[in-house]
Amino acid sequence: MQLPAPRGPLTDRLFAELSRPPHAFGPPPADAYGVEEDSQLALFVCYELHYQGFDGVDDRWEWNPAVLALRERLERWFERWLARRVPRPPAPPPQEVPRALAALVAADDGPSLSAYLRGRADARRFREFVIHRSIYQLKEADPHTWGIPRLLGRPKAALVEIQSDEYGGGRPERMHAELFRATMRGLGLDDSYGAYLGSAPGVTLAISNVMSLFGLHRRRRGALLGHLAAFEMTSSLPNRRYSQGLRRLGGDAGARRYYDEHVQADAVHEQIAAHDLCGAFAAEHPGLTGDILYGAACALTLDRLFAEHLLGRWREGRTSLWEADAEVTTR
Ligand SMILES: [Fe+2]
Ligand SMILES: [Fe+2]
């Protein structure tokens, strides 16, 4: 994957440093943080050093103290960004966690992107949607895998069970990321990892960033599990609609398989995630039930913001992808 074009002073500076051999550098001044596109992309690139890295960027940057110091400032900004958008749900008693997760999901009243894609989107818009999703779905499940060594016993077994399905259960051609690559090829898109990073707006990057934030910090493990549960609990029905939309647009079975697979798989995963994962974890860590719910609320809110962004742009007859001249500054 190539480093994308910078979007402001932070990414300008960071990408210039990363293009050189690892060295010390001072973090950018405090007033440089907060331009949304610039900050989300900078954070995404810092995190990506822990996944596949970038062509021409030395692997030793991953644990370089200067990058970690910058990442820490970006994370503080991002935590405030989340706190302003995601009200913290009350902490339920441990045995109520699966029910509280279900209630949170049921109360979600964001606009339905999947209904639009099923019935109305043209091929160009469906392709845009797939480009956005490629940022996460080409590394599907990886951020939640950080949670495995942070768990013990029943919740650990539950997370491994879900992740094993996501990774194809030993069959690479059944990995969800690989199924998604077939969807991309079916739509005439480049299926290589990170090919569209430069087209992803901040709201799309935030969806990945929140998972990495929760996954890479042990103290956030409750939120990580709640996030996964909300993901799985809101997946089955939309994926059925995505498949129907793609069929309407002429997508063949291979291109639709990613979506069809999720209709079945996530109907099972949502039960495992709510009960065996979050329920069992809550019983062991009663003080973290609020974190579980907060992680779930973050997933739901970001998905709503994502849907609002796409539908809003399309209503205006504009692309929903990142365009350098469409900078929006929100702090
Ligand atoms: Fe999946
Ligand atoms: Fe799943």
Image (cartoon, helix red, strand yellow):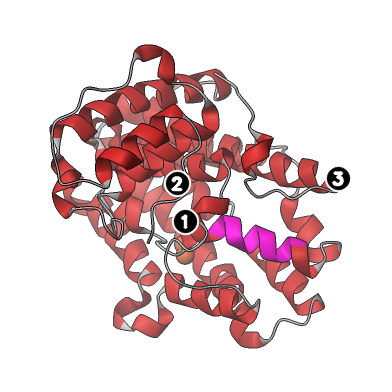
Label annotation for residue 315: 3
Badge 2 or badge 1: first in the primary sequence: 1
Is 253 in front, or is 270? 253
Q: How dense is the environment of label 3, judged by Cα within 10 Å: few (below 14), some, or many (20 and up)?
A: few
Q: Which residues are magenta?
A: 125-133
Badge 3 or badge 2: first in the primary sequence: 2
How many angstroms separate mark 3 from mark 2 (CA)? 25 Å
Vertical placement of residue 22 versus 125, above or below: above
Label annotation for residue 8: none
Residue at left 49%, top 23%? 81
Q: Are marks 2 and 1 in contact (CB under 8 Å)?
A: yes
- Which residue is identified by label 2? 208
Q: Disc 3 residue type?
A: Arg
How many angstroms separate mark 2 from mark 1 (CA)? 6 Å
- Which residue is identified by label 1? 136
Q: Disc 2 residue type?
A: Ser
